[in-house]
Image: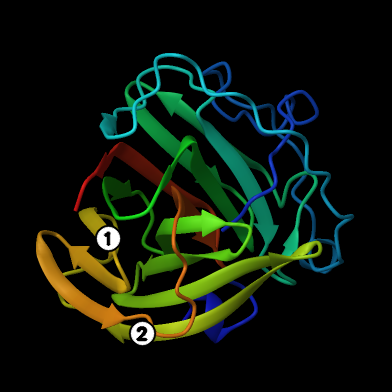
Amino acid sequence: MQIKAMKPVIFFLAILTLVSLACSVDLFGTPTPAPALEVPSTEASAQPEQPAATPELQQPTTNTQQFYTEEFDSESESWQYLVVNGSNKKIVNGIVGLMSVRPIGGLLIFDLQGPSAWVYATYEPYTYTDVRLDIRTNNRGSNNNNISLICRKSDAGWFEFDIANNGLYEILFGKIVGDSVEYTPIADGGSSKIRTGMAENEYGITCLGNTLTLYINGEEVRRLEDKKYLLPEGKVGIAVSSFRDAPVTVDFFWAKISQP
């Protein structure tokens, strides 16, 4: 099972500095292809990265909404980013392989050209107690990778729902500790509702009280009660992760934040 807690190659949240990555990682930047760069070797990517600095979060713009559907049709400072090197779970002050995340033609496209790249995007303007998050995605590769939804993200940690392209899923507790992210598995399983390979899927989660629920293509597939971490509130987010096989390219049509 190639999902985060089950092996060292597989949310959150140090912010990538756009200026320093302008030549390689275009996060909500100019929608032109990034120039070709040499992809680091496996040995190089496995080396520990320098700890990422944590700059102050940008203040939300006046037109942000608490509950809305993000259609990724324009640039936005409301979504902030974190990259984790999946080979050692270190927060990366830079890139893992050649990657870009950008809105193009009404899609938010995660294009991960290298292995072991775990790229997170968090909606920063609002903190939620009870919340539902839904997304529609298109996987443009048949190789195994993760698409993730996150809720209750704060300094205390977050809940992460990973759906793999091989039909498996996992629910994790994640937390930033020093310059690394620690993942603790809560539950896992598989579902025939996941359209594997090159396919479109709709995924949803709810965090309601201590109840965590995962939905796949309109069907509830897992519901559980958290009796250990008891996170009261936090931010929501999405993520895409590559493992040993690359490239991984995933399109997000929209992300809907609503009341459960």
Q: Nearer the viewer, residue 144 or 64?
A: 64
Q: CA distance from mark 1 to mark 2?
A: 15 Å
Residues packed near mark 1 inside 10 Å, few (<14), some (14 to 19) or many (20 plus)? many
Quadrant where the N terminus lies?
A: bottom left
Q: Judge whether 135 appears above or below 34 on screen.
A: below
Question: Who's the residue at 30% across and 67% down the image?
Answer: 209
Q: Residue furthest left?
A: 218
Q: Nearer the viewer, residue 144 or 177?
A: 177
Residue type (three-letter) at the residue carrying disc 2: Asp
Q: Nearer the viewer, mark 1 or mark 2?
A: 1
Residue type (three-letter) at the residue carrying disc 1: Ile
Residue 22, position in %: x, y? 72, 24
Q: Is residue 244 visible?
A: no
Residue 228, position in %: x, y? 47, 84
Residue bearing the label numbered 1: 205
Q: Judge whether 144 appears above or below 39 on screen.
A: below
Which SS class for mark 1? Answer: strand
Question: Who's the residue at 70% across and 47% down the image?
Answer: 14
Residues packed near mark 2 inside 10 Å, few (<14), some (14 to 19) or many (20 plus)? some
Marker disc for residue 188: 2
Marker disc for residue 10: none
Q: Is residue 21 visible?
A: yes
Q: Nearer the viewer, residue 209 or 142?
A: 209
Q: Residue furthest right?
A: 50
Dividing the picture into quarters, in which one does residue 220 lie?
bottom left
